Amino acid sequence: MEAIERVLSELPQEIVTRDQDIVSTYTTDFRRQYTGATPAVLRPRTVAEVQQIVRACAAHRVGLVPQGGNTSYCTAATPSDRGDELVLSLERMHKIREIDAANLSLTADAGTILSELQQAASDVDLMLPLALGSQQSCRIGGNLSTNAGGINVVRYGMARDLVLGLEAVLPDGSLYSELSPLRKNNSGYDVKQLFLGSEGTLGVITGVSLKLVRKPKQSVTAFLAINEIASLASILSQTQVQTGEAVTSFEYISHSSLQLLLQAKANLRHPLQEMSEHYVLLEVATASPVLNLDDTVSVLLADLFEAGLITDGTIAASEQQRADFWHLRESIPEAEVHHGGSVKHDIAVRTSRLASFIERATGIVKESANEAILSVYGHVGDGNVHFNVVPPDSADKDLFKRRFEAETSSKIYDLAFEMEGTFSAEYGIGRAKLDLLTAYGAKGKVELMRTLKDVLDPAGIMNPGKVVPKP
């Protein structure tokens, strides 16, 4: 603790918060599964102050845990329970530095809330495609450090695909700054990619330049009942072709997930007359004011009905109905919490193999815990499915989840590995998935990550114990 006190004595006291009533709001992870401890939270106002913090921590070998909106699912933003690390919150660094509408770009501090960036883009008739359920509280630095996904990946890619330039404070306190929002820059290594997905283990992201796109002038949202899960890839392919690749979102919702939600929230209603085991929420959009997207989607749905791929469906007739559809999709995690929480599996496989994975993984669960409730939903357009297992009503919730995770989750991960998929599609690694990275990481990847970590952060102060498994 003497080292921490020396660090704190070298910093401007206006950026140091020691009040444990306040500090405690930074030390529990988003899912409330892990609580750490820290003597203080540091809240810098400028990049120079971030550099000062990192230099002091490096000099005294004190661990530093960067934190954005604290919405990580894998305890990446939570300090250890030893109390020997400091939390660095970027919440005071929330300036939008520049919007270049003609260049379709936006440059901002890393502590800016995602929804504020979306609004800034909208104010100049543009759109930031990154969209997440936590966008009212998550901050862009955290989004980038975890390489967040979201609902628009099928068209616009992951968070890393939207980054034009980056600024980061390195583990020795020096600054890497390549913020210029160039569309082409072939000047050596693409260094910024090292920090995207590294969860603060190689440095602290302080600024970013992001790609914007034209704001859609038309969008059509449809909620569909599909005949069988095996047709998911065919429906997606047909939708992309007939709309001219205008698909922005293509989400799968299982009947059991929807039922969990409707049971948890009596004020919500099922959007269709006909029940099905499988549903798709799709959205297409275009910036063109002249293309007739309504007719295009109507023809698409007629073709899907005729081919027997869908059995029922409805198109949002208003912005409110569109919002209602999305509210159903985005509220499923909340419904799982209402029913006692879930064992989460953040899986990605090839889109062509997703239906097969869901069917085979369902068989694994039924064989191991037939009474379990499956909550399966996800971003089918990019091969990501949240394959979650909810305890039955009669079970001891915590005991069931511990047993399932210990006895069955590995079989689900084995299946994903067998199908050349991944155990972490968009949640990252943090502290929670270190063992999974060791078991299922790509050949040579963990060793290369350790080498990079040792070279850039030889003192091991940046987010210790996260992302990079120890030998």
Image (cartoon, grey):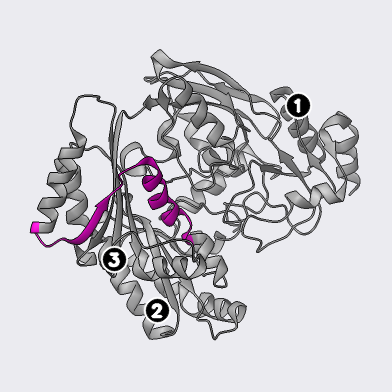
Compared with 81, 51 (above or below) is above
- State the extent of the magenta-drawn residues as a range: 306-332
Q: Secondary structure at mark 3?
A: strand
351 and 122: which is toward the camera:
122
Q: Residue at x 58, y 51 (%)?
A: 72
Residue farthest toward the left in the current orientation of the protein = 306
Question: Residues under labels 1 and 3: Cα distance?
Answer: 51 Å
Viewer can see residue 165: no
Front position among marks 1 and 2: 2
Query: Residue 269: which numbered mark, if any?
Result: none
The amino acid on which the numbered mark 1 sits, given as a three-letter code, is Glu
Q: Amino acid at mark 2?
A: Val
* Apparent side of residue 55 relative to residue 7 in the rendered image (left or right): left
Q: Nearer the viewer, mark 1 or mark 3?
A: 3
The residue identified by callout 3 is 278
In which image quadrant can residue 218 be found? top left
Of labels 3 and 2, the one closer to you: 3
User: CB under 8 Å between callouts 1 and 2?
Assistant: no
Please name the residue that numbered disc 2 is placed on: 365
Q: Earlier in the sequence, mark 1 or mark 3?
A: 1
Distance of label 1 from label 2 (alpha carbons): 50 Å
| Percent x, y of residue 139 | 59, 38
Q: Is residue 200 magenta?
A: no
| Mark count | 3
Residue for badge 1: 49
Residue found 44% across the figure and 45% down from its top? 149
Specify the quadrant that holds the C terminus: bottom right
Picture residue at 11% right of the left edge, 62% below the top: 308
Q: Which amino acid type corresponds to the residue marked 3 in the rendered image?
A: His
In front: 307, or 298?
A: 298
If you read the primary sequence from the N terminus, does the residue marked by circle 1 or circle 2 appear first?
Answer: 1
**Residue in the image at 65% along x and 64% along y:** 33
